Image (spheres, grey):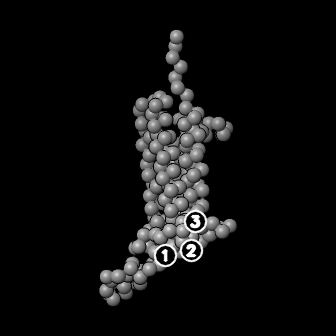
Amino acid sequence: MRIDKTFQTSFWPIMAAIAALSALGIAHAFETFGGLMPCALCLRQREVYWLALTIAIIGLAVMRAQPGWRAERGVVALLGLTFLTGAIVAGYHAGVEWHFWPGPSTCTGGGDALAGLSIADLGAALGKAGIPPACDQIPWSFAGISMAGWNMVLSLMLAGASFYSLTQAKEPEIAP
């Protein structure tokens, strides 16, 4: 496949869907096979990919029903904004991990998350498959960058690719 076809607005939603599925598959593989439980912010990052996948699938249906550059641009712009949102969520999570700012009180290493639990509730929680880590802990990193950091990089690349794809949209030529 030629690289210029990848960024055509009519083709980019397919590539975005593949990227979203790949990111979700990798995250679930780390959880299932690597034993890395996701924290609350990790799950928020996954929601963005589910949204991007949904937009891509519905967008492809809309583009098929309403062919034309307007539908293509609308879908690709939504994908770009969705991936940009993913970069912001991932960047926020990476900042929490590096203690640049506090995370949600229910997801950081404080004792507030356990407040209000009875001994029975705590025992039941401990008996489950695993307890998710606090959002301010880095359970895995590569080259000194956490999964949230890598997700921010990927999301920025996907947002950039989406916005670049917008520049490739061809408006119909108006006959004189």
Q: Find out whether the residues at labels 2 and 3 contact each other: C-beta distance under 8 Å.
A: yes
Residue 159 visible, this angle: yes
Identified by mark 2, the residue type is: Pro
Q: CA distance from mark 2 to mark 3?
A: 9 Å
Foreground: 60 or 154?
Answer: 154
Residue at 39% across, 78% down: 113
Task: Reply above or below: 159 against 130.
Answer: above
Q: Name the residue that disc number 2 marks.
A: 139
Give the mark nearer the N terminus: 2 vs 3: 2
Q: Position of residue 50 (x, y in %)?
A: 45, 54
Q: Count the marks: how many? A: 3
Q: Position of residue 44 (x, y in %)?
A: 45, 62
Identified by mark 3, the residue type is: Met
Foreground: 55 or 116?
Answer: 116
Q: Name the residue that disc number 3 marks.
A: 147
Task: Reply above or below: 145 against 161.
Answer: below
Q: Considering the numbered disc 3 on the image, is that residue within a helix, a strand or a loop?
A: helix
